[in-house]
Every structure is written in C-alpha cells, then in structure tokens.
Image: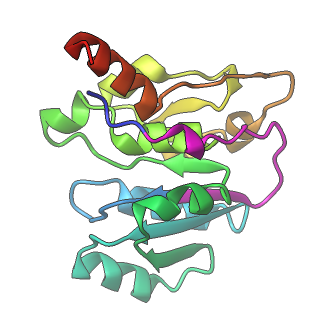
Amino acid sequence: MPNYPPKSWYKTPSLRHSFPIKIVYIGALGLDTMYTHEFTNWVNSQKGKVIWDIYSYNITEETISFFNNLKSEFIHLHNGVSYYELPTILSNYDVGVILYKGHIPNYVFNAPNKLFEYLVTGLDVWYPDVMKEISKFEINDACPKVLALNFSMLEQFDLGKAINKKLYSLITYDYFCENSLKKICSELQV
C-alpha cells in the first residue's frame, strides 16, 4: 500500500511565481549520501533568487556544523515538525526538493513519501535524475511540475525555465491515502 498523505492536505497549485522562490526540504539530512553540498552551493550562487528552508529531526552533527559554519542568509535550518503540521508548513513554499544520491538501489528505484506530500500540497518537485522511479512521475509542461535535475551540474540548471508556469495547465493529483485504503478494503471485501 502506498504511503500517501490524506485528502485534507490538498492545495491547488499556484500558477504565479515571484522572487525569491521558496524551496523546502523535509526529512533526514546528511552530507554523504545526499546532494546537500551541491544544492547548498547552488542556492548560495543564486544570491537571493531562492531561499531554502530545511526541517529535520534526523540530521547529523556534521551537517548541523556545516550549515552553522556556512552562515548563509539564504538557507535556514529548522527543527523537525509533526507530520500533522506538514500541510501548513508546505503551503508556504513553491518547490519541494529531494536530495538522495541514489547510493543504494532503494534510493534509485523508490518514490519517497515526500514526493507525494509535496505534490498534493501544490508544490513543484525537484529531484535528482539518478532516482529512476520518480521519472515515472516527471512532468514539465503542467503544474505542479516534477523535474529531474543533474545535481552534479546545477550550474547548468535553468531556474527561469523551471519556474515558468505561463500557459501551463493545472494537474490534480490523487495520491491520497483514502484512495489506497479503498483498494485494500475492496480486496479484503470489507
């Protein structure tokens, strides 16, 4: 059974954008198996066009030290939040980012929960192109967008194209736990 969020999380995506683009990352964070360094460097190189907020309960001391020493005005580290607070938190952002390097098959052939949490709350999603399972959900001509990025070459990433939503249609995703439960109940004949 997929671990989708509830329907109550749904938020209509916005077709407008303004600077700074507000990016969020929710979840465990480290430096070794994630594109943390690369994305941090890219965010700082944007000189305020983007702001990145991180919410994590599970973050290594090394990673905390990395961000504290960085002292970036464009990156903010927050404590983790309750699962039930996520829809309120996510509604303040434009893009949800996924950072796994795909260092093991589970991270290559997996669509993590945060993909669906970001999408149903109306956020575009940026993910590493090494995550093959997410490519099944990729969409770049409607909103919310799901875009594969080469995190090893972010200097070539076209931010303007990524955030352009003019003339795009809205997609309504139905990645909700209620839909999954209906299938299971049907199978169990409940």
Q: Position of residue 69 (x, y in %)?
A: 41, 88
The answer to whether residue 39 is above or below residue 70 is above
The answer to whether one can see residue 151 in this image is no
Q: Which residue appears farthest toward the left when viewing the image? A: 104
Q: Position of residue 132 (x, y in %)?
A: 31, 24
Identify which residue is drawn at 67% across, 36% down.
Answer: 162
Q: Quadrant of residue 83?
A: bottom left
User: Looking at the figure, which quarter contains the C terminus?
Assistant: top left
Q: Nearer the viewer, residue 110 or 129?
A: 110
**Quadrant where the image shows the N terminus:** top left
Task: Count all numbered tags in the image, as a single digit.
Answer: 0
To which quarter of the image does residue 151 belong?
top left
Q: Please tell me which residue is depicted at 72% across the width and 38% down the height of the picture.
A: 13
**171 left or right of 28 in image:** right
Q: Which residues are magenta?
A: 5-24
* Residue at 31% in and 64% down: 29
- Taking depth in this image into account, of 129 and 8 the one nearest to the observer is 8
The reply to whether residue 29 is in sight is yes
Q: Nearer the viewer, residue 157 or 182?
A: 182
Where in the figure is residue 55, as x and y percent of width and height?
Answer: 45, 69
**Residue 167 lies within the magenta run:** no
Locate residue 37 relative to residue 59 in the image: left or right.
Answer: right
Above or below, comparing residue 62 to residue 9 in the picture: below
Q: Is residue 167 above or below residue 127?
A: above
Task: Give the image's coloring scheme.
Answer: rainbow
Determine the main secondary structure of the stretch shown in magenta: loop
Residue 158 position, x and y percent, is 66, 39
Q: Is residue 10 magenta?
A: yes
